[in-house]
Image (cartoon, rainbow, N blue to C red):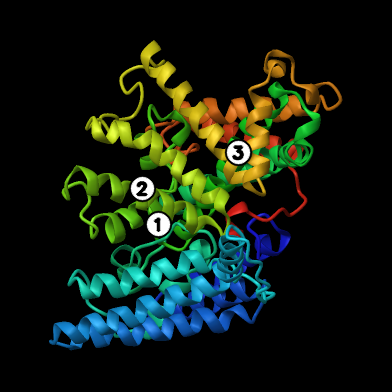
Amino acid sequence: MLFNSIEFAFFIPVVFFLYWMLTQKNLMLQNILILLASYFFYGWWDWRFLSLIIFSSCLDYVIGHKIYNTDNKKKKKVYLWCSLIVNLGFLAFFKYFNFFIDSFEDAFSLFGTQLEASRLNIILPVGISFYTFQTLSYTIDIYRGKLKPTKDPIAFFAFVSFFPQLVAGPIERATNLLPQFLSQRKFEYAKAADGMRQILWGLFKKIVIADNCAVYVNEIFANHTDYSGSTLFLGAVLFAFQIYGDFSGYSDIAIGTARLFGFNLMKNFAFPYFSRDIAEFWRRWHISLSTWFRDYLYIPLGGSRAGKLKSIRNVFIIFLVSGFWHGANWTFIIWGFIHAVFFIPIFLAKKNRRNMDTVAMHSFFPTIDEFLKMVFTFFIVVLAWVFFRADNITQAGNYLLGIFDSSFFSLPQILSPKPEMLYTIVCIAFMCMTEWFFRNKEHGLEIAKLSKLSRWSMYVFVGVLIISFGNFAKNEFIYFQF
């Protein structure tokens, strides 16, 4: 079920009414309702996928208790490895099986040997990369002694399948979200109202920004040999806003929806395009994934305390794995490699944590130095996005070569036959200005402290933009494929 669909517009009020009106005084009934609603929400795509998430939930619920109730360290490790192998095995099979086959064939072809291996017509279960990491955080934290296993299977199953963030995050930690299923929740008007504001802002970013940018991005990337360098660069910039509007829009809707039901999900985006270097960008982009890799992969590898060479190795591993997590294509790995290349010099100079505060913290406008750093960082991110968006390495290489052509200094061709793009650019500018104004807030529409007239004027204005310029074609979210 899509957030930007009529079905979801009916689904949410019904679940909300049942949740607060009929089950408010009974925690178990609340959790049962959340669980059933989550399975209904997930099964809307393909009910067969439910068997996989139910199996993963059963497996990690049992293994969590096995790890906790065993004093033998070797047995604890065996149980943990069972969870890792089964969960990551499912992920590898559904997401990477054909990729490994293709890479295996390509490797042999370099030596003049042609192999014809069989491929499977595998349907990727929606959200498998997200809920797999979520369940793994449960077993790993129990193994580390940071969490006790829950004795409430309903609460655990609801935690794994919680519908607002099930399909595309944020990737929640068991230490944060699971306890919220174990404690009584009461309706809070202020929290619900802010949740509605965040949902509205998320819908604006998805329907107005992302889906309108997608129209032009798809055309430019599909026919990149026909366009000038300036048009190709414009296409890359539009994709940067498409993927930001799409993914952060999903996170806004997910976090806002969770707040309607009394839950607090972790912040997943912190206005990343206002970053002053790549290190800051990764502290602000897909925060739940980057911190997951930091805590469960980077630090166990030794982090930055393993010596200079091993620290560099660890950084590259994190970025390459992050790229590979996104999809079974070498383009994603190169995308991660590019970010690692620009991160390493900052890391070696020990400046990767120099921009921990909000840009222009004590003034409305950034300094010239901050502005130039933001422009440079955005430029690097945009060029790296070309590999993320391209179908293959060849297309990405040709696209970048096309950008750095003498025609880069000409007017973008696509503006002439499609003047409606100007409306999209104006909406992008509005989004950027709004988020700049609220850059030290949790989301771009956190305006509770403004006057009632100002708040409602903003609601109406954003609503008019959605109705007037929204793309209502029920486009799926980009990260569904990951």
| Point 32% across, 36% down: residue | 344
| 64 lies above or below 311 | below
Do callouts 2 and 1 mark residues in contact (Cβ within 8 Å)?
Answer: no
- Give amino acid for label 1: Leu
Q: Earlier in the sequence, mark 2 or mark 1?
A: 1
Q: Earlier in the sequence, mark 3 or mark 1?
A: 1
Callout 3 crowding tier (Cα within 10 Å): few <14, some 14–19, many ≥20: many
Q: CA distance from mark 2 to mark 1?
A: 29 Å
Q: Quadrant of residue 95?
A: bottom right
Q: Which residue is mark 3?
A: 386
Q: Is residue 142 left or right of residue 320?
A: left
| Point 71% across, 38% down: residue | 217
Q: Which residue is mark 1?
A: 265
Q: Quadrant of residue 292?
A: bottom left
| Point 54% across, 66% down: residue | 127
Q: Position of residue 455 (x, y in %)?
A: 53, 34
Callout 2 crowding tier (Cα within 10 Å): few <14, some 14–19, many ≥20: many
- Give amino acid for label 2: Phe
Image quadrant holding the N terminus, namely bottom right
Do callouts 2 and 3 mark residues in contact (Cβ within 8 Å)?
Answer: no
Q: Which residue is mark 2?
A: 316
